């Protein structure tokens, strides 16, 4: 006879997360993902700002390229935040929190020249890739495949985008 699926004792038992990853590991991964979320959001805002403010003979190319990139980054913040929630922690979501958590600086106050924008974005994508890569050992150790999968997807995008932007700077 199949073992009956009995609810765990205690009226709040269902509120406790029991997905096979210990609280300490979930906390460490969620903390790493909070940094990734802040980096991704900051890079999103920087790229959208550059879409608005780019000038010069490369205007059309960069204006459109930046639009594709900021759209991708905007879509990326949601799964990162929701993974943090699935691990049982609050997702950061304010300018103050993002400013404190991000490894990349805020958007420059004055719009840079077009090629300086490209350089700043190359550095930004590489910085976000380093942040994502740094979380991998934690996800691996905890057997957290969904986070490892998310990190793999983000690394693919950031490394490819850095290559494409870097190619614009080469003769
Ligand atoms: Fe636009």
Image: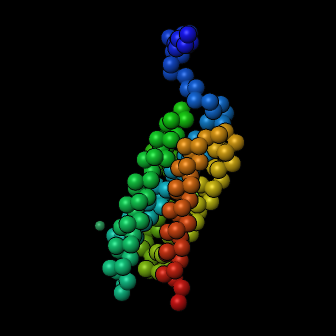
Q: Is residue 148 visible?
A: yes
Q: Residue furthest bottom?
A: 171
Query: Quick check: which quadrant has ligand 1?
Result: bottom left
Q: Is residue 98 above or below residue 55?
A: above
Q: Is residue 99 visible?
A: no
Q: Residue 2 location, x and y as percent?
A: 55, 13
In this view, the residue in front, 2 or 118, is 2
Q: Residue at x 63, y 49 (%)?
A: 135
Q: Is residue 49 left or right of residue 144?
A: left
Q: Residue at x 54, y 73 (%)?
A: 163
Q: Residue furthest front?
A: 1
Q: Residue 147 location, x and y as percent?
A: 56, 45
Render colour scheme: rainbow
Which quadrant: the N terminus? top right
Q: Residue 167 location, x and y as percent?
A: 52, 80
In this view, the residue in front, 125 or 152, is 152
Q: Residue at x 44, y 80 (%)?
A: 113
Q: Is residue 57 left or right of residue 43?
A: left
Question: Across the whole image, how many numbered discs are drawn on residues?
Answer: 0
Q: Is residue 136 above or below residue 128?
A: above
In this view, the residue in front, 139 or 50, is 139
Q: Is residue 153 above or below residue 21?
A: below
Q: Residue at x 63, y 56 (%)?
A: 133
Q: Residue 61 location, x and y as percent?
A: 36, 79
Picture quadrant of residue 144 = top right
Q: Is residue 86 left or right of residue 51?
A: right
């Amino acid at each position: 006879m199949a073992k009956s699926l009995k609810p765990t004792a205690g009226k709040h038992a269902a509120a406790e997360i029991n997905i096979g990853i210990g609280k300490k590991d979930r906390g460490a991964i969620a903390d790493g993902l909070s940094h990734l979320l802040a980096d991704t959001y900051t890079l999103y805002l920087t790229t959208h700002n550059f879409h608005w403010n780019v000038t010069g003979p490369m205007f059309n190319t960069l204006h459109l390229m930046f639009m594709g990139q900021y759209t991708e980054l905007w879509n990326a913040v949601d799964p990162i935040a929701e993974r943090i929630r699935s691990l049982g922690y609050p997702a950061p979501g304010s300018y103050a929190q993002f400013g404190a958590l991000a490894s990349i600086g805020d958007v420059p106050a004055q719009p840079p020249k077009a090629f300086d924008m490209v350089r700043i974005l190359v550095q930004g994508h590489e910085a976000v890739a380093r942040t994502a890569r740094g979380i991998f050992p934690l996800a691996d150790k905890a057997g957290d495949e969904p986070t490892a999968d998310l990190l793999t997807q983000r690394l693919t995008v950031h490394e490819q985008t850095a290559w494409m932007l870097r190619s614009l700077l080469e003769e």
